Amino acid sequence: MHQRCYHRLVAIDCSPDLAPAVALFRSLGDPARLAILLRLTRGEARVVDLTRELRLAQSTVSKHLSCLRDCQLVDFRVEGRQSFYALARPELPALLRSAEQLLAATGEAVALCPTYGSSTVRGDDA
């Protein structure tokens, strides 16, 4: 049985094999989670390090680290009373580098996409 996926208002049949990839890219699609992952490509960090470097609230960082842990993209180790977070998968830095190369190759085409692009890149105030 195929899962129903929705693009705009049209339902399409999605292969069950696509569901994990869709979930992966959704997990990477949040700006805070992506920023956390990009920071962790440089090495492990504590929540306090991430909040300071990324200028995010502690609750935001904790919530997104929990999500990334649930997806098994991030893991942690405890040292004394501190937790140090790190990437759980060695494939992640290569995936993120590939995404950066793809974005460089397409220029601003993705950012200007009327459906998924950033309104700040287009110059909209909305």
Image (tube, grey):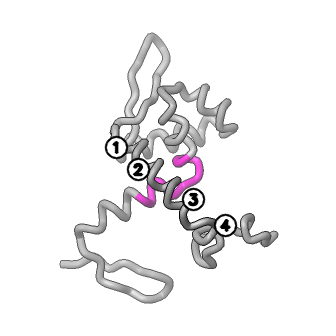
- Which quadrant is the N terminus positioned in? bottom left
Kind of residue sitting beneath label 2: Leu
Report which residue position mark 1 lands on.
91
Magenta region = 25-34
Q: Which mark is residue 95?
A: 2
**Is residue 60 positioned above or below 125 on the image?**
above
Q: CA distance from mark 3 to mark 4?
A: 16 Å
Q: Residue at x 48, y 87 (%)?
A: 9
Kind of residue sitting beneath label 4: Ser
Q: CA distance from mark 1 to mark 4?
A: 27 Å
Q: CA distance from mark 2 to mark 3?
A: 14 Å
**Magenta stretch containing residue 90, yes or no?**
no
- Decide: few, some or many residues near mark 2? Use Cα within 10 Å; few <14, some 14-19, many ≥20: few
Asked whether disc 1 touches disc 2, contact meaning CB atoms under 8 Å apart, the reply is: yes
Nearer the observer, disc 1 or disc 4? 1
Asked whether disc 2 touches disc 3, contact meaning CB atoms under 8 Å apart, the reply is: no
- Front residue (pair 20, 106): 106
Classify mark 3: helix, strand or loop: helix
Q: Earlier in the sequence, mark 3 or mark 1?
A: 1
**Is residue 56 positioned above or below 119 on the image?**
above
Report which residue position mark 4 lands on.
118
Q: CA distance from mark 2 to mark 4?
A: 22 Å
Report which residue position mark 3 lands on.
104
Nearer the observer, disc 3 or disc 4? 3
Nearer the observer, disc 2 or disc 3? 3
Q: Earlier in the sequence, mark 3 or mark 4?
A: 3
Kind of residue sitting beneath label 1: Glu
Q: Earlier in the sequence, mark 2 or mark 3?
A: 2
- Decide: few, some or many residues near mark 1? Use Cα within 10 Å; few <14, some 14-19, many ≥20: few
In the orientation shown, which residue stands out farthest toward the bottom? 10
